[in-house]
Amino acid sequence: MNKSIRLGASFALLLIVALLVNFTVVQGLREEKYAQDPRNSRNTIELNQIDRGQITAGGQVLAQSHKGEEGTYQRTYPTMPYSFAPVVGYVSSQFGTSQLEAGYNAALTGDVAGGTSRFLRTGLEEDQQGDSVELTIDPNLQAFAYEQLDTQGYEGAVVALRPSTGQVLAMASTPSYDPNLISNPATAEGAWADVNDNPGKPLLNHATQEQLPPGSIFKIVTATAGLRAGFTPDSMLTGEAQTILPGTEIPLTNYGGLPCAGGGQVTLATAFALSCNTAFVQMGLQVGADGLREAAAAYGIGEKYDLGLPTAAGSLGDLPGGAEVAQSAIGQRDVTMTALQAAVMAGVVANNGVRMAPYVVSRVLRPDLTEVSRTKPRQLNEALTPDEAATMAGLMYGSERNTWGYDGNGFASKTGTAEHAEGADPHVWYVAFDPAKDVAVAVVVKNGGHLGAGATGGQVSSPIGRAVLRAAPAAEPESEGDAR
């Protein structure tokens, strides 16, 4: 064999080896990156060729596929489509997938159960049946939470979960939409235009994706930082009507510009119950930026959760100086949270300081109903010591008594009213938990709800939160064990 033939053969062999290596990398290591990329047009084509598994909650079918006369499948959403759309999402041959339909696409199309790569075709894909996904959400509570927002025309979100496990019981988001109209090719174009023209952004899951200033519910974080710095419920703080932001001539006032409990000095317990801004500015400045950051991180602010849904992380923002720390200590300036993070925060206090990973998918089932996987409760961190958690719970009981007016409901809570843009009505919050039922809730209503500029969390959001807590099912005895 002459030299030129040997070189040519060697070069060809190298090319074959390189091709095999690249093929192996793509098939074995990059399948998720390429095959499951929403921009992959093959995915869109396959959406109506595979019998996707069902999505269910509490025994009710939320999403299912039907085979048409042409032999292709169309996705339908037969049960409470508006209540569940921001969680379940949609499947459309024109517009792809969203929310859980996207996050659990591999399971729903059978790729996980069968181990079939999208790049390795057998010719039998049209006969493939996907796995079913079972949610933790209680359908009755989901419908109830959604109606609490929707019937009053509110834009916002409600999240209810079990503090001891992280199981999400309700995740309502408004405004919403009918996913059947997007999945149906006959109505998809018009429905798509409608939802994208809606300034309320109905395609967004406002419970997990929208980061909003939390206002005074963030005082849970600031109070936690204070406890770690040596404050107690009896520590004295200022109750004056206003304070000047450090390094500026800008006043920061209590709500309505009024002194707290008559002014002078007030205890931390009183300041928390009455939500005194000036007191928390003083405490925030004493614990400093590092103290606030440590406490916020312990509660999960700045962290995304893996739910199979898009989630936002929230943020404390930059804290370069005293003025920024002071404003952030009352949940303003650049502080943001999602409703899910707010519910987790309340759940930490309820769960003796332990933060559990929230989850919305309970099980994945094969077509023969055998389990592919089951979500197990997972501890993320001990955000508070048991003593700190007990102290924070006591402060939240005091806040609920002040907002509700008497001790009769057994809930622990904190309200919030958050300014967010000049001339805009405030976003209003309520976070609470019911220890008797092992349920925590977070409610946010955007832009003041029906009360506009004069809205507060106590007036608008707290009635919704209390109603959801009352409607929530108590934990079943078999689920109450140590989930850590």
Image: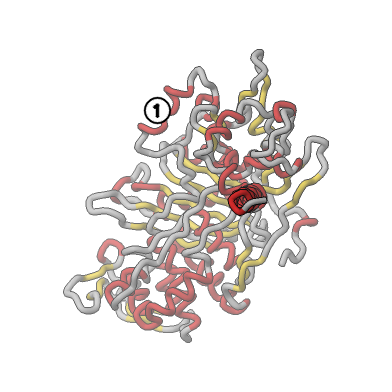
Residue reaching furthest to the bottom: 230
Image quarter (top left, top right, bottom left or bottom right) of the C terminus: bottom right
| Residue 260 in view (yes/no) | yes
Give percent across and percent down for residue 243. Answer: 25, 75
Give percent across and percent down for residue 324. Answer: 30, 72
| Residue 56 in view (yes/no) | no
Tell me: 344 left or right of 328: right
Give percent across and percent down for residue 397. Answer: 53, 66
The quadrant holding residue 3 is bottom right
The image's colouring method is secondary structure
Instruction: State how many labels appear.
Output: 1
Residue reaching furthest to the top: 69
In terms of depth relative to the viewer, which is nearer, 272 or 58? 58
SS at mark 1 in the image:
helix
Check disc 1: other Cα within 10 Å, few if <14, some if 14-19, many if 20+: few
393 w.r.t. 137: above or below: below
Identified at 27% across, 74% down, the residue is 323
In terms of depth relative to the viewer, which is nearer, 389 or 360? 360
Give percent across and percent down for residue 177. Answer: 48, 32
434 w.r.t. 119: above or below: below
Q: Callout 1, which amino acid?
A: Asp
Circle 1 residue: 194
In terms of depth relative to the viewer, which is nearer, 314 or 407? 314
Identified at 45% across, 79% down, the residue is 226
The quadrant holding residue 242 is bottom left
Tell me: 186 left or right of 410: left
